[in-house]
Amino acid sequence: MIRVIINRYIAETLEKNYEDAALEVLAASVKAPGFISGESLSDIENPRHHVILCKWRSKLDWDKWFESSERKEAMSKLSLMLEREEHVTLLDSRH
């Protein structure tokens, strides 16, 4: 199992639009093979900074989702609302 951390910074005044678009991305990801869980958190100090935490069965499953046409389509709307490109970090427990 891997964990994925996605940092997004939302452009000013687009917060509500972002929430709707983010729900579309989440709805699409839930259907992807290997998706286990996900949650979206807002930075207390900067409400335009959102952190998405998700669990995937494997890096291969994540990579397939990340490159999928479904994600690209869902992200096409959302990415227009970001003030910078999202930053993705993949984590793995090596115990």
Image (tube, helix red, strand yellow):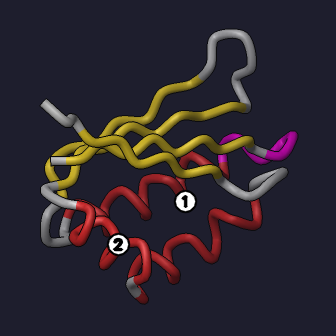
On whether residue 6 falls in the magenta region, the answer is no
Location of residue 57 by image quarter:
bottom left
Q: Position of residue 32 (x, y in %)?
A: 21, 71
> What residue is rendered at 30% in x and 78% in y?
64
Q: Position of residue 51 (x, y in %)?
A: 53, 34
The vertical placement of 28 against 48, above or below, is below
Q: Say the numbered circle drawn on residue 21.
A: 1
**Marks 2 and 1, Cα distance to the nearest angstrom?**
21 Å
> What type is the residue that disc 1 sits on?
Ala
User: Which mark sits nearer the N-terminus, 2 or 1?
Assistant: 1
Badge 2: how crowded within 10 Å, few (<14), some, or many (20+)? few
Q: Say the numbered circle drawn on residue 1.
A: none
The vertical placement of 52 against 84, above or below, is above
The vertical placement of 22 against 65, above or below, is above
Q: Secondary structure at mark 1?
A: helix
What residue does disc 2 label? Answer: 63
Q: Position of residue 48 (x, y in %)?
A: 73, 31
| Magenta segment boundaries in residue numbering | 11-16
Q: Position of residue 52 (x, y in %)?
A: 46, 40
